[in-house]
Image (cartoon, rainbow, N blue to C red):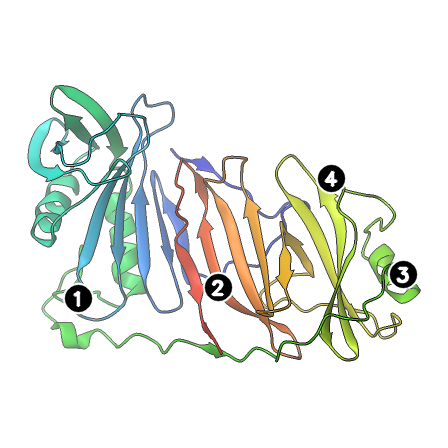
Amino acid sequence: MPAALVLLTPLVAEARATSPAEVSFKDWTVVCDNLRNCEADGFAVDEVDKPAILRLTRSGAPGAPAGVEIVLLDDVGAISGKPLALAVDGQPVLTVRAGENASARLADTQVGPLLGAARNGTVLSIRLEDNEVGVVSLAGMVAALRKVDDEQKRIDTVTAMVAKGPKPASAVPPQPALPVVRAAPAVAQGGLPAKPPAGVKALATKAECDIEQEFDTRKPEAHRLSADAVLWQIPCGAGAYNYTSLFIIADNKGGGARLAPLDGADDSLAVNAEYDPQTRILSAYAKGRGIGDCGQSNEWAWTGQAFTLTQAASMPVCQGQGDWPTSYQAKVE
């Protein structure tokens, strides 16, 4: 079973899950976003010699097809353009041409036959000529695909992958509208204080951040949000591959200091965070382990009142997955 990722530790406290679906079923995990776009990933069981990922993606649009991609995680050399034979429990199913980056995308006409064969199987194997180059567990696949059907409101329709029914594609509701976030105007960054004033120090201390301690040579940083508002980024902890910052807003002299509101977060802490005053975007990236194959990332836009969530991605299990599925998205204007 894929290694679990625990995000809510003091070091990597991050925005709460914004995905309507972020759940695992045995060796499969599902992440959907606020537009009902979903990704389901199947992994190998632990300690398999040739692990691979079976990745299914599907838009929340009523008539959108499902796309399936095979990703090989072990180094198998240059395989672009070569045929990969897919078999379920040793029974050949189909052959697909490898693309670049040790991956292969199935044609639309191949998706149905593969999923049909896999739903009653236990293991998907991928072979290049006489060599097995990848293995994916199928335990949990049916439950994962049913979850995608449910999140995309395809249950009992002809568009469902598992929970099929007689209802037409028109019974699937349209996707929700993409939220729009209006960022505050950019402001010049001149005249910033060199050190945190007393009011900022006091609030950081109250939040249990030692403002006098340096974490991995990081020091407090100031960014101007407006003529009379300054955003302070205070180092608040560090580990091998994550560092935590506390964000505080105050006036130029430290008056009215308050914790910066981060939409969807339990507090004003963010991991591996940076603020860009030109875009007004505060970004964070919490790695579940050093190679960055699991964790959560978030982006917030400063609106003049708060930091509003505009983007989130998450991979809740650590199994070599480099591209994290999107769990929330919005348009920034």
* Label 4, label 2: how far apart the Cα atoms are: 27 Å
**Label 1: which secondary element:** loop
Comparing 99 with 158, the one in front is 99
In this rendering, is residue 1 above or below 141?
A: above
* Mark 4, secondary structure of its residue: loop
**Percent position of residue 88, x then y:** 14, 33
Which residue does the numbered mark 3 point to in the structure image?
Answer: 202
Mark 4 or mark 2, earlier in chain: 4
The residue singled out by tag 1 in the image is: 156
Q: Crowdedness of circle 2 by 10 Å Cα count: few (<14), some, many (20+)? A: many
Mark 3 residue crowding within 10 angstroms, few (<14) / some (14–19) / many (20+): some
Choose the circle earlier in sequence order: 3 or 2. Answer: 3
Q: Position of residue 306 (x, y in %)?
A: 65, 74
Which residue corresponds to mark 2?
A: 311
> Which mark is first along the chain, 3 or 4?
3
Q: Earlier in the sequence, mark 3 or mark 1?
A: 1
Label ID, residue 216: 4
- Circles 3 and 1: CB distance less than 8 Å? no
- Nearest to the eye among marks 4 and 2: give it: 4
